[in-house]
Image (cartoon, rainbow, N blue to C red):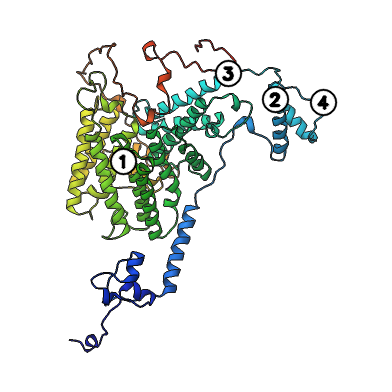
Amino acid sequence: MDAAATRRRPVKACTECRQVKLRCDANDTFPQPCARCTKRELVCVIDSTFKRTATRLRLQSVTNELRQLKEALNAQTTEDPLKATSTASLSDSTSSLQRRDRSRGPQQRSLPSSDPFGLREDEKCLLQLREARLEDSTFDQNDVRNLFLFLHTVQAILFLSTWPSPIMFQLEDPSLMFAGIAVHAAFILGLPRALTSTGPLSSTISQEHREAMAKTWLACFSVHTSLSMFMGVPPSLRGAHELSTVDTILERSFVPTKLSIETEIQRCVAKYHDAMLGEMDGPVRETLVQMCEREMDNIPLRLSCSLDSYLTFSFVVGKLHVYTLALVREGASTANKRRFDPHTRGATFQSLGMAAANRIIELYCNGLETPPGQNDKNLIDHYLALPKSFFRGVLFATFFLLKYFALNGSCPDEDKLTARNKVLMVHAKLRATAPHQFSESGRAATVIEVLCRHADSGNTNMGIEVEDRASASVAWGALILASKIRGNRSWSTNILQNINPTSPPEAAGSRESFADFPPDPDPTVAAPSDEDMSLPEDIWDQSFLDLLDFRAYDFNGGLDQPLDWEVPGQQNAAFRP
């Protein structure tokens, strides 16, 4: 035995007490913890190899980590919200014009010869031009009525974003454009200020209508943020002002629970988006992931509700976006962007992402099925009636498993086999639910099959790595690789030039069009369905439909008659566009 080891003093104090140089009674209380660890609820461990860390170094390390964390959270862009045209004015004339508007009722539209507020000559000219269109001496109550007809237009655009028309190329998907139009129209109508705005027009709006406006704004935020993440575009509604407005509306009791959960999930993703992609040390990014994960886990607890299979799907997809953001950023500084040493942050994010992707695929293939007898597949297939976000979510999870596991040469064989089995589950489900081979689900199954055969051949080359599309880089990279494997280089060049206009163009080639293929020689003709078939009672029981109150419509009489909004002081007549 070494002489130095025999002369080593016996250790009688725990590591916590040795760190702060305090007397420890662990030797007397053994096997119970010492008094200090018991009082502070610490782990009392006696370790002879423990070496004390200087307090100054510990303080400096914690201070640096907190400073980087604060800088990352404050790095979010603070964009000024779009303002409605009814409140626009010059900066130096704002206060005077607001005082004038408060002193004038809706029935007073003529300008006096002298201004009691002492406006300058140029301001008087501006005021006359601003109120030139309001020369009527009467207040048209139909303006209030038309406002809510426009509100239904915004809601209709959101539905087009949720269920877009089928497309032949993913670059032609108009969902994000529709969502942007809905957000812009919502700002013009003042939906974010529905609960806080005051004025002559706002006083005529009932509380029920204000709540409808607020719920529509939550739907705008949720749909636009979700589409932005799938397309690889930074969410435009991620500033501190927009997130504060969403929090204010979510605190109200009239918001449906399912819509609240969907919005809370997207709020967490938008809140941490810029911070995840910022320049920071690895431990700070890991702390941000843990904070976002903890905040998302607290959503069901805070709302005191349980998640059904649809909400669980959105919940896990949101987590996968967070893990992928951290993983893409973690691998940006390495040569092999898919290879991480075990027990590192990159390997941890990979494991978390794999668990989330497996859960998404299991829900899509098995958890979204309706119970027997509650859905007539002769009327419509259940998977074709789902919002497109479910289709995008399962493809996102599939491409994640392909990139980081099936096509990763450094991945363990066991993880490769698990990922391959999950990918084959998605392939089989898409094949079974595709109306024909050139539908979106049919083409997606073909892409997955091409990538799986590429992985089976032992080739792990991903080709061009897309890095500037956040979490959507995984999906874009998979689509580019599949197009190159199939020899469709012109299409992959078109993708690169659309997602990154600075990419150098490749040799020109003919763009393959799926529309040029001959149709199926023996297409299956669907049998006519019974038009008097009764619809299920819970057909509207989904979070993406909570923004509307369908009880206001008479479904037996058809959907061609809009809601007859009640205007105070006026007897409404039936209105048809």
Residue type at numbered disc 2: Gly
Residue type at numbered disc 1: Phe
Residue at horizontal 20%, vertical 38%? 425
Vertical comparison of 503 with 120: above or below:
below
Label 3 belongs to which residue? 568
Q: Are marks 4 and 2 in contact (CB under 8 Å)?
A: no
Mark 3 or mark 4, which is nearer the start of the sequence? 4
Instruction: Tell me the element at label 2.
Output: loop
Instruction: Tell me the element at label 3.
Output: loop
Task: Give left or right: position of 466 versus 487.
Answer: right
Mark 2 or mark 3, which is nearer the start of the sequence? 2
**Comparing labels 4 and 1, the label whose residue is closer to the camera:** 4
Q: CA distance from mark 1 to mark 3?
A: 50 Å
Percent position (x, y) of residue 567? 56, 18
Label 1 belongs to which residue? 396
* Residue in the foreground of this view, choosing between 385 and 442: 385
**Comparing labels 1 and 3, the label whose residue is closer to the camera:** 3
Q: CA distance from mark 4 to mark 2?
A: 18 Å
Instruction: Tell me the element at label 1.
Output: helix
Q: Pointer 2: residues within 10 angstroms few (<14), some, or many (20+)?
A: few
Label 4 belongs to which residue? 113
Residue type at numbered disc 4: Ser
Instruction: Tell me the element at label 4.
Output: loop
Residue at horizontal 29%, vertical 18%? 535
Q: Pointer 4: residues within 10 angstroms few (<14), some, or many (20+)?
A: few
Vertical comparison of 45 with 71: above or below:
below
**Comparing labels 4 and 3, the label whose residue is closer to the camera:** 3
Percent position (x, y) of residue 524? 21, 18
Q: CA distance from mark 4 to mark 3?
A: 34 Å
Q: CA distance from mark 4 to mark 1?
A: 65 Å
Count of marks overlaid on the render: 4
